[in-house]
Amino acid sequence: MNTSRFGELEVLCHTPVGTQTRPAPLLFVHGAYTAAWCWEEHFLPWFAARGWASYALSLSGHGASRRRAPLDSFSLDDYVSDVAEVVARLPEPPVLIGHSMGGMVVQKYLERGDVPGVVLLSSVPPQGLMGSAMGLMFTKPNLLVDLNRIMGGGQPQLDSLRDALFHQAIDREILLRYYNLCQPESHRAIWDMTLFNLPRPTLMHRPPMLILGAEFDTLIPPDQVHATAATYGRQAEILPGMGHGMMLERDWERAATRIADWLVEREL
């Protein structure tokens, strides 16, 4: 792994292994409360071993990226500008792969620029976070309270972190490591994704798009994944037996393999 500085942004990079190099690089965009580390666990080395130059960005205020302003000052548009900054520095236009909040960032990026392809993993739908918040209010109110606590700088309960990200069994030591890597999120960005800066599909470029959800996702349940797909005239695919953090689940390779197959089908 190489850690690069794209200006003030942290970008983790794995170069392709072997002689086969795929035509399009991959740029992974993380969700709320995390950073580029969540892709380093499995996805970056796995895709590099199969020929893709693989990059993961830590958005402003996350990981080792710029923190010159308070976290709550960063908006969704600031995160989109981060993606645009990295895209401009890559040797070729990348396929954008966004998880959860990162999926919303990718959707908003398409209002500005085009890319060869997009993968949305348990993405915040273009209708925003209100549906997710209402669902949690009725089904898992304690988890909703804990997510608000994290956003304000508090620490999550381990049980809440497990409920939010995982359906499959996870070792306690690994869960504790993820716990220590979690961080607060920008209130401003959350409100942008809830009401104030939702995607405008009529203004967006429409590259090939793969939309994946997880059967047991408590944060972005399958009905919201289907809503995203319907907005863009696509068919959603729901991965059975998995939770929201599909790139960290025990069976993460099923998600990676589906993405790789889709990329190969489109000669990306």
Image (cartoon, rainbow, N blue to C red):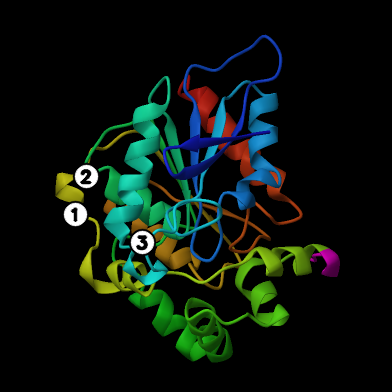
Residue 164 position by quadrant? bottom right
Amino acid type of the residue that numbered disc 1 sits on in the rendered structure: Arg
When the figure is inspected, residue 76 is found, relative to residue 83, above or below; the finding is: below
**Distance CA(mark 2)–CA(mark 3):** 15 Å
Q: Nearer the viewer, mark 2 or mark 3?
A: 2
Q: Amino acid at mark 2?
A: Glu
Kindly identify the amino acid type of the residue bearing the numbered disc 3. Pro
22 relative position to 73: left or right: right
Q: How many marks?
A: 3
Q: Is residue 66 magenta?
A: no
Where residue 169 sits in the image (x, y, percent)? 80, 66
Q: Secondary structure at mark 2?
A: loop
Within 10 Å of disc 1 (Cα), the crowding (few <14, some 14-19, many 20+) is: few
The image's mark for residue 213 is: none
Choose the circle earlier in sequence order: 2 or 3.
2
Q: Position of residue 150 (x, y in %)?
A: 54, 78
> Counting other residues with Cα less than 10 Å from the Cα at mark 2, is it few (<14), some (14-19), or many (20 or more)?
some
Residue visible at 26% across and 37% down?
206
Disc assigned to residue 111:
2
Q: Which residues are magenta?
A: 169-173
Instruction: Classify 10 Å Cα crowding around label 3: few (below 14), some (14-19), many (20 and above).
Output: many
Q: Earlier in the sequence, mark 2 or mark 1?
A: 2
Foreground pick, 130 / 222: 130
Asked whether the beta carbons under mark 2 and mark 1 sit within 8 Å of each other, the answer is yes
> Pointer 3: what residue?
125
Depth check: give the residue in front, 182 or 143: 182
Q: Tell me if residue 25 can be seen.
A: yes
Q: Which mark is residue 200?
A: 1
- Predominant secondary structure in magenta? loop
